[in-house]
Image (cartoon, coloured by chain):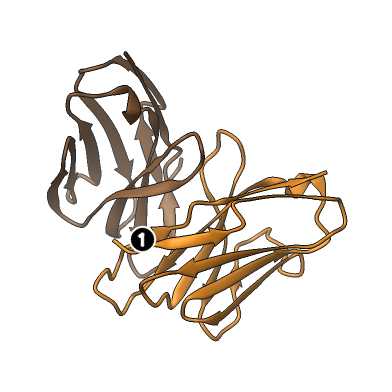
Chain colours: A orange, B brown
Amino acid sequence: GAVVSQHPSWVICKSGTSVKIECRSLDFQATTMFWYRQFPKQSLMLMATSNEGSKATYEQGVEKDKFLINHASLTLSTLTVTSAHPEDSSFYICSARDPGGPFYNEQFFGPGTRLTVL
Amino acid sequence: KNEVEQSPQNLTAQEGEFITINCSYSVGISALHWLQQHPGGGIVSLFMLSSGKKKHGRLIATINIQEKHSSLHITASHPRDSAVYICAVLVQGAQKLVFGQGTRLTINP
């Protein structure tokens, strides 16, 4: 299967600062990328879907001005948590999909980024 | 009621036992995924199914589209199989996955 990387794998920041998380597809072109958040002992919660070259579609209840998503290329999507607060501390996971490729319906997940806001 | 239900939520077994985790869903799907999440957090895609059965090593996944049900089996279970196993469905006509709540599996030596 294909490989998706995330950077950084963990980050600790002060309240009020912004944090950028990168998601890269390493060996395929990801026309669609997804960003999830996971709280301890809970399942993944979809935050937004981003298609390359267009604006992200946010799920209900997710603030688009707080969680900025940019999918500027077929291999890179970024999630910026702006003015982070302790309640934003979570595990953020991206996944990527190439509907036009050989893995048509498959999503490939990144290793996740653990964000801790002090 | 969730669109994707897994059972059991927690499962503890002894090394060597045969393990079955079940997933039922209530929507039309294009595909079903079985995912594994270890304590470190990273998610590994084990299988993607749209029909029938798939096998990879000690893992077997089956799906019955008519009954809207899938099972994940682990033969000769091992402590390293301890993880959370997540069933996720790709709803027909949609891009996004809908996740089950996960099954926490613990295999004791």
Give x and y (percent) for residue A29.
39, 77
Q: Quadrant of residue A25?
A: bottom left
Horizontally, is B97 left or right of A85 in the view?
left
Q: Whole-percent x and y of residue A12?
A: 75, 48
Quarter of the C terminus of chain B within the rendering: top left
- Asked if residue B5 is positioned above or below residue A81 in the image, the reply reads above
Report crowding for label 1: few under 14, some 14 to 19, many 20 or more residues within 10 A (C-alpha): some
Q: Residue furthest left?
A: B52
Q: Position of residue B32 (x, y in %)?
A: 29, 53
Q: Chain of mark 1?
A: B
Residue at (68, 60) in percent of width and height: A62
Which residue, given by chain and number where applicable, does mark 1 sit on?
Answer: B91
Q: How many marks?
A: 1
Residue at 23% x, 42% y is B70
State the image coordinates of residue A66 (x, y, percent, origin top left): 76, 64
Left-right relation of B79 to B101 = left
In front here: B83 or B48?
A: B83
Report the side of A25 relative to A84 (left or right). Answer: left
Outermost residue, right direction? Answer: A16
User: SS at mark 1?
Assistant: strand
| Callout 1 amino acid | Val
Task: Note whether residue A51 is visible.
Answer: yes
Q: Is residue B36 above or below residue A5?
A: above
> B56 left or right of B11?
left
Residue occupying image coordinates x 31% and y 39%: B23
